Amino acid sequence: MNHHALPTWTIAAPLVAALLLALSLMGFSGGLWFTVLALALMATVFAAVHHAEVVAHKVGEPYGTLVLALAITVIEVALIVSLMLSGGPATAALARDTVFAAVMLILNGIVGLCLLVGGSRYREQSFGLYGVSASLTTLAAIAVLVLVLPNYTTSSPGATYSSSQLIFVAIVSLVLYGTFVLVQTVRHRDYFLPANAPADHEAHAQPPTHAQAAVSAGLLVLALVAVVLLAKSLAPTIESLVAQAGAPKALVGIIIAALVLLPEGVAAYRAARADRLQTSLNLALGSALASIGLTIPAVAAVSVATGWTLTLGLDIKSTVLLLLSLFVCTLSLSTGRTTVLQGTVHLVLLATYLFTTIVP
């Protein structure tokens, strides 16, 4: 990677996106405007990935993947909370739908694509078992506590927690995620380093200067804010198109989650193509953990403060797909080596999830 100068388009894309957002607030709309915003979103996603890679190369692994995962998740949480505050009690299931969509898209979509692309290009790829095992263990615990257990508690009717239960689960989620970050960055950082680090020429290339990294960090934040706000601006049109097509409303959450996850997905895909599967898995699993581990405490605080009921429990179909995805992911990543087979299985599960959402 050339760090001597930032490509002009990576600087222009976030700035143009910010300008388009300002014009949207002034009343610009219509089908052509929707297309312009969609194109700006795609360009900004790729700009965000570039700046994230510059920052990641400066701070080193696994801090680099953590930077992108946390940055996107914090802004995603802000988006969900703002939609909850503006939508009121009608958004009771918004957090559940978004978090579930993010977890499924990451476990089956991003991971599956990375395994398939890496396996196709290199026949077989390897990664460190300890880091992946730690990620999956933590993710399984938080996901079941947040999305499955509410269906079986009796203090509150339906797929909900009582206020005290919600506060407890929010604290537990923060504890688990905080402990994971401590293990990833301090106590067992070596678990998350690429197995072929000594041979990774890109990792050992000349890092960017402090000034270049600082500029990229600022542009990364701007690009990520623009991605989320563009997704929010596109949401009403997406909702209208989904309604016109007669598709379930849950499809809107999937589309918005996919838009927000695009920067991480592209970064993970590029790492897999460069034979850095460990980085891909760090990005994917770390993003899933950050998405659920930070979103739920935030929306729980909003729920308790406003008195609105927060629906968290999944229906039976979604529960089966979630548990199957966690089970398959654990098996496919249990040997430290992957081929195209594991990638194909994950993508089939993604297709099943998307199909059964449209045709329940």
Image (cartoon, helix red, strand yellow):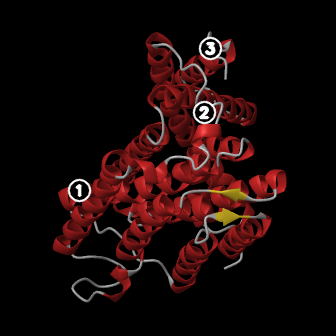
Residue on which the image places disc 3: 6
Viewer-nearest of discs 1 and 2: 2
Cα distance between the residues tagged 2 and 3 = 13 Å
Furthest toward the left, the residue is 164
Q: Quadrant of residue 66?
A: top left
Cα distance between the residues tagged 3 and 1 = 40 Å
* Numbered mark located on residue 160 in the image: none
Q: Amino acid at mark 1?
A: Ala
> What secondary structure is found at the residue carrying circle 1?
helix
Closer to the camera, 47 or 241?
A: 47
Q: Is residue 94 left or right of residue 15?
A: left
N-term-proximal mark, 2 vs 3: 3
**What quarter of the picture does the N terminus occupy?**
top right
Closer to the camera, 184 or 265?
A: 184
Q: Amino acid at mark 2?
A: Val
Closer to the camera, 168 or 97?
A: 168
Give the residue at x 61% y 54%: 239
Residue on which the image places disc 1: 301
Q: Amino acid at mark 3?
A: Leu
Q: Is residue 221 above or below residue 192?
A: above
- The percent position of residue 129, horizontal first and vertical second, equals 53, 63
Q: Is residue 236 visible?
A: no
Viewer-nearest of discs 3 and 1: 3
Residue on which the image places disc 2: 49
- The percent position of residue 39, horizontal first and vertical second, equals 72, 32
Give the residue at x 68% y 17%: 9
